[in-house]
Image (cartoon, coloured by chain):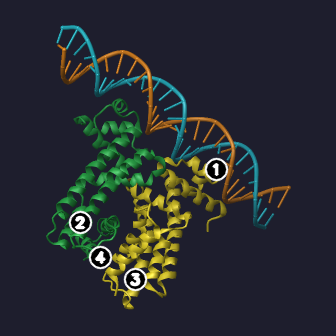
Chain colours: A green, B yellow, C orange, D cyan
Amino acid sequence: MPTDKQRTLLDGALRLFARDGYARASIDALAAEAGVSSRTIYNHYGDKAGLFRAVILDSSDHVAERQIALADALLGRVVDLEADLVEFGVRWATPEPDFAPHFRLVRHIEADLDNIDPATVAAWHERGPLRVRHALAAHLGRLSDAGLLAIEDPLLAAVHLVHLTATSVAAVPDADREAVVRAGVKVFLRAYGA
Amino acid sequence: MPTDKQRTLLDGALRLFARDGYARASIDALAAEAGVSSRTIYNHYGDKAGLFRAVILDSSDHVAERQIALADALLGRVVDLEADLVEFGVRWATPEPDFAPHFRLVRHIEADLDNIDPATVAAWHERGPLRVRHALAAHLGRLSDAGLLAIEDPLLAAVHLVHLTATSVAAVPDADREAVVRAGVKVFLRAYGA
DNA sequence: GACCAAGTACAACGATCGTTGCAATCACTA
DNA sequence: TAGTGATTGCAACGATCGTTGTACTTGGTC
């Protein structure tokens, strides 16, 4: 139950941490971005690491819920499997621009693993990427049980699907997003099609 | 033609930049790591950004050459396509531990894109990942021409192969490396097999 | 041995930063 | 209106950092 000011602070801190990283983003800049006194940050979160932990957990919760909702919507009741997977991949690979700071922050975490509290990293990983992966794997497993796919290891298949679509789109930024996703889904279906 | 001291400096700076990131790695620490005066760094590279540029270009050249050599060795003359691809994937996904700092540094670059000289980023990207991707795509295209694979877009296929093997291994660190690679290669071959 | 480039040690500068204490202020409830 | 808890502005601290200038030393060449 974060108040309005806390919401503004978490959002602003996400932007600054994402753009500048943990070390470069100064407490004063974080406070100014949210129109808050730097003293308030210390009153609420103890220190800089506490604020960072709150920011990444808050953000990854939002993103995970959105991604899981996307999977539920498009893979819950499948009409045309290939078309639904393509739309799933396209929507996944073109996240709301609001989410760009989140994924940039994730890269900072992956780069800064030796300088971030391991408990924070573990909490983010479980509640974010792992939770989403399991949700996606559940859908794929269900589609496999229904005879629409032939999957031995749903968790690995979930990893493959994401890497063949969203990750590949990020790796080839000049190309047409939908074409890359379509090609990735085609690969996925040739490998996992029933 | 870097002298011994410059070699030691580049290697030590790679380690520190990789572990601590650009902002946290101080010039004095970088100098101490290599047993060099901090003044020498300024004499050689002008400023911190200049040293960073030299470090990432040097390191990505080494890694790219090693990866291209691996592709040449295993995909140059193919005996058993699936076995060769699996060994290629395993060797790619288990790089010499010497290369761990490089890949950690790459993550820092991807996270810090807004704070690094764009010319440095572009130079690294061209001489590193893009060069390797083109080399790998050339092998895949040749195998396709030879009738061992059926590939429309070799560059995209190269991206798929790497993501299905090395990237997937990194995403599932608890699992058996070779099993993950083997599954990834199986997916690749079902999609791109002749 | 003289010379020269390269490297070093040292001090100093301005700047930035995380963190704390304290007094003043504000919003809101009894 | 009095009181209470959250918020703020401000000053200050010790620490770290990038960078530069300068004088000194070192290693190798004529």
Q: Label 1's element?
A: loop
| Viewer-nearest residue: A2 or D10 | A2
Residue furthest to the left in view is: A79
The disc numbered 4 marks a residue on which chain? A
Residue type at tag 3: Leu
How far apart are the alpha carbons under marks 3 and 1? 48 Å
Sequence order check: which comes first, mark 3 or mark 1? 1
Q: Is residue B101 above or below residue A49?
A: below
| Viewer-nearest residue: A133 or D6 | A133
Give the labeled residue for mark 1: B37
Q: Label 3's element?
A: helix
Give the labeled residue for mark 4: A187
Front: mark 4 or 2: 2
Q: Quadrant of the N terminus of chain B?
A: bottom right
Q: Answer whether labels 3 and 4 touch (C-beta < 8 Å).
A: no
The disc numbered 1 marks a residue on which chain? B
The answer to whether residue B115 is visible is no
Q: In this rendering, do the residues under marks 4 and 2 share a single chain?
A: yes
The answer to whether residue B162 is visible is yes
Q: Label 4's element?
A: helix
Left or right: B142, with B20 as reference point: left
| Viewer-nearest residue: A91 or A118 | A118
Give the labeled residue for mark 2: A142
Count neighbours of disc 2 (C-alpha within 10 A) and say few if under 14, some if 14 to 19, many if 20 or more: some
